[in-house]
C-alpha cells in the first residue's frame, strides 16, 4: 500500500493546493481512527506515524502518564507514574508511553471512515489557507465575480478558492447583481469559521467610498489630499470632507476631476450615488458650515455641553438645508459628529430669547438677585448655577460692575442653592418608592407598584382617586384595564367599608 499512499498524497496535494504534510497528517488521523475500531469497548489513544519517503507506517497505542494520587478519569488511555516508570525510564507526569500494535486492516467501512477524515482535514486546511492569504488585506478594495445571490445576500468568488460574502445590509439598496457579474467591495473582516463565509465585504461602508477615491484620485492615493471623514446614505447621497497637505493643491477640485470625471467614476461604482465634496476644517463651527453645503448658513450657535449646534438659514432655503427626508442635515451631522438643529433666523432668535428667559428666571429664583443682575449674567454667557459656583473668580470679576464683594456673594448663594437642591433630591429619592399599603393591595405586584410610584401614585389613597382609564395612560407593561380597575377597587375597599358602616 505504500506506493499507493504516496500517489494519493501527491494527487490530493496537487489538486487542492495544500502542503503534503497536511495530507499526511490527515491520513495519519484517518488510520488512527480505523485502528481504534479494534477496541470497540474502550476509549483508547492511537497514533499512526507515516514515513513520508517510502509510505510505510507504524501504529502505536498511547497512555498519558498521570500522578499516582490522581483518580484516573479514563483508565483506557491513562497510566499512573509508578506503573509507567516500569515501561519507560525517565517519564514524567504529562508524558506519553507507547506500545506498537498491528497496523489497521482497511476494510470497506474503515476505508470510508478514513476518506471522510481526509476530506474533512483537507477542507479545514483549505479554509485555513484562505484566512492566512487574506487576513493581511483587511481594509483593502477587492474585486470578484458574483457566484450567487440568496435573499439579498451576495456570494462572491475572489479566486484561489476564496469566497466572500456581502450581507444584505452591507450592500447598496438598488444594486442588481447577478451570477457572473463583476463586483467590487471593501474587505472589512476575515474570520476563521468552521463553515460558511470567512471573508466579509461591504459596499455600504464609508470606507468603501474613501478607498474608491484613493483609486480614482492620484492626489489622494499619494497623500497630497486626505479624506478626513465620510458619511453615506448608500446608493443615494454622500458627503466627504477633504484636506490638502500641499498648499498648491485644490483638494475639492482634485477629487472632482476634469469635468467631474473622477467623482463621476466613483458615483458610477456606487449605483449613481451623488457625492458632495466639502472642505474639512479643524474649527467645528466652520466645518459644520462647510458640511451643510449646498445650503448657506447665516449664523450658528454652539452648545459645547450638549455637543450640538443651532444653524440659522434663510427661510426660503430651509427646505434645502434640511434636505429630502432630513438627508442633508443628517449627513452633515454624521460627517461632523455634531448634533445639528436647522431653523430660520426668527426661530433661532426666539429659541435664544426663550433660553435666556429661562436662565434669567433661574438666576432670579436660585440666587435671589434682581432682573438686572440676572440679565447681566445671561449676557455674559452664564446659563447655570453650577457655572456661577465653580467658574474661576477672574471670569466673574471681568464682568463690568462686579467687584469682589458681589462676586463672593454670588458664588456663596450659588453654592447654597446647589446644596439645597442636592438635599431635596436625596429626600425625594427616599420617598419615591411605593408605600407599604400600596404594595399590600390584593392583586398588586412589586413591578406594578414601582411603576405606579414613578408616575406619582405612591399610596393606596393616591390610586383610589384615579379611574382605570387614567391608570392606563401611564402605559405600564403587563397592566390591562381590567386589572387596573381591580386594583383601584382594592384601594377603595377600606373607604367603601367605612361608608357601609356609616362612619
Image: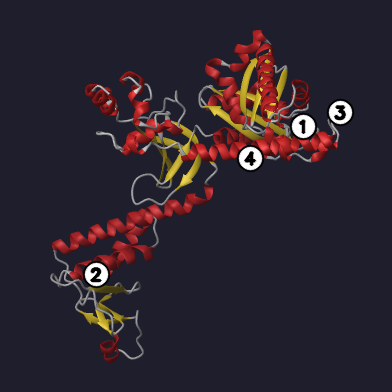
Q: Residue at x 74, y 26 (%)?
A: 369
Looking at the image, is 27 positioned above or below residue 251? below
Contact between labelled residues 4 and 2, with CB atoms less than 8 Å apart:
no
Give the secondary structure at mark 2: helix
* Disc 2 target residue: 32
Q: Position of residue 15 (x, y in %)?
A: 35, 54
Closer to us: mark 2 or mark 4? 4
Q: State the image quarter where residue 346 is shown.
A: top right
The disc label shown at residue 249, or none: 1
In the displayed structure image, the side of residue 144 where residue 419 appears, left or right: right
Give the secondary structure at mark 1: loop
* Disc 4 target residue: 419
Closer to us: mark 1 or mark 4? 4
**Disc 2 residue crowd, few under 14, some 14–19, many 20+, Cα 10 Å:** many
Q: Earlier in the sequence, mark 3 or mark 1?
A: 1
Q: Earlier in the sequence, mark 1 or mark 2?
A: 2
Separation (CA) of disc 1 from disc 2? 68 Å
Q: Position of residue 44 (x, y in %)?
A: 21, 73
Looking at the image, is 136 positioned above or below residue 247? below
Amino acid at each position: 500500500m505504500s506506493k499507493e499512499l504516496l500517489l494519493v498524497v501527491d494527487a490530493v496535494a496537487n489538486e487542492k493546493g495544500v502542503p503534503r504534510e497536511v495530507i499526511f497528517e490527515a491520513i495519519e488521523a484517518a488510520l488512527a481512527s480505523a485502528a481504534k475500531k479494534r477496541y470497540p469497548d474502550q476509549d483508547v489513544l492511537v497514533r499512526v506515524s507515516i514515513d513520508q519517503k517510502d509510505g510505510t507506517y507504524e501504529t502505536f497505542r498511547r497512555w498519558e502518564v498521570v500522578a499516582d494520587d490522581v483518580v484516573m478519569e479514563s483508565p483506557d488511555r491513562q497510566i499512573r507514574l509508578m506503573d509507567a516508570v516500569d515501561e519507560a525510564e525517565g517519564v514524567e507526569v504529562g508524558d506519553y508511553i507507547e506500545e506498537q500494535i498491528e497496523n489497521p486492516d482497511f476494510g470497506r467501512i474503515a476505508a470510508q471512515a478514513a476518506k471522510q477524515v481526509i476530506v474533512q482535514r483537507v477542507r479545514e486546511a483549505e479554509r485555513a489557507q484562505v484566512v492566512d492569504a487574506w487576513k493581511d488585506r483587511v481594509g483593502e478594495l477587492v474585486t470578484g465575480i458574483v457566484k450567487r445571490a440568496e435573499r439579498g445576500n451576495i456570494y462572491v468568488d475572489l479566486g484561489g478558492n476564496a469566497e466572500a460574502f456581502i450581507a444584505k445590509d452591507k450592500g447598496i439598496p438598488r444594486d442588481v447583481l447577478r451570477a457572473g457579474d463583476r463586483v467590487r467591495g471593501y474587505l472589512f473582516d476575515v474570520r476563521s469559521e468552521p463553515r460558511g463565509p470567512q471573508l466579509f465585504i461591504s459596499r455600504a461602508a464609508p470606507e468603501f467610498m474613501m478607498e474608491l477615491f484613493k483609486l480614482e484620485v492620484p492626489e489622494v492615493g499619494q497623500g497630497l489630499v486626505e479624506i478626513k471623514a465620510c458619511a453615506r446614505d448608500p446608493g443615494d447621497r454622500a458627503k466627504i470632507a477633504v484636506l490638502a497637505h500641499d498648499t498648491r493643491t485644490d483638494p475639492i477640485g482634485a477629487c472632482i476631476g476634469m469635468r467631474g470625471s473622477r467623482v463621476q467614476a466613483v458615483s458610477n461604482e456606487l449605483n449613481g450615488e451623488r457625492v458632495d465634496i466639502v472642505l474639512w476644517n479643524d474649527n467645528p463651527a466652520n466645518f459644520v458650515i462647510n458640511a451643510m453645503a449646498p445650503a448657506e448658513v447665516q449664523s450658528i450657535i454652539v452648545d459645547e455641553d450638549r455637543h450640538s449646534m443651532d444653524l440659522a438659514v434663510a427661510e426660503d432655503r430651509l427646505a434645502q438645508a434640511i434636505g429630502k427626508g432630513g438627508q442633508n442635515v443628517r449627513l452633515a451631522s454624521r460627517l461632523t459628529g455634531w448634533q445639528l438643529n436647522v431653523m430660520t433666523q426668527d426661530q433661532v432668535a426666539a429659541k435664544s430669547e426663550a433660553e435666556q428667559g429661562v436662565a434669567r428666571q433661574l438666576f432670579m429664583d436660585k440666587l435671589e438677585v434682581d432682573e438686572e443682575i440676572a440679565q447681566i449674567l445671561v449676557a455674559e454667557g452664564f446659563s447655570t448655577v453650577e457655572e456661577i459656583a465653580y467658574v474661576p473668580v477672574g471670569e466673574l470679576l471681568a464682568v463690568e460692575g462686579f467687584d469682589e464683594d458681589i462676586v463672593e456673594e454670588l458664588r456663596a448663594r450659588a453654592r447654597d442653592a446647589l446644596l439645597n437642591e442636592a438635599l431635596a433630591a436625596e429626600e425625594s429619592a427616599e420617598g419615591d418608592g411605593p408605600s407599604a399599603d400600596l404594595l399590600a393591595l390584593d392583586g398588586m405586584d412589586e413591578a406594578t407598584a414601582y411603576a405606579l410610584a414613578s408616575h406619582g401614585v405612591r399610596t393606596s389613597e393616591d390610586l383610589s382617586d384615579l379611574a382605570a382609564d387614567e391608570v392606563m395612560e401611564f402605559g405600564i407593561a403587563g397592566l390591562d384595564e381590567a386589572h387596573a380597575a381591580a386594583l383601584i377597587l382594592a384601594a377603595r375597599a377600606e373607604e367603601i367599608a367605612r361608608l357601609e358602616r356609616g362612619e
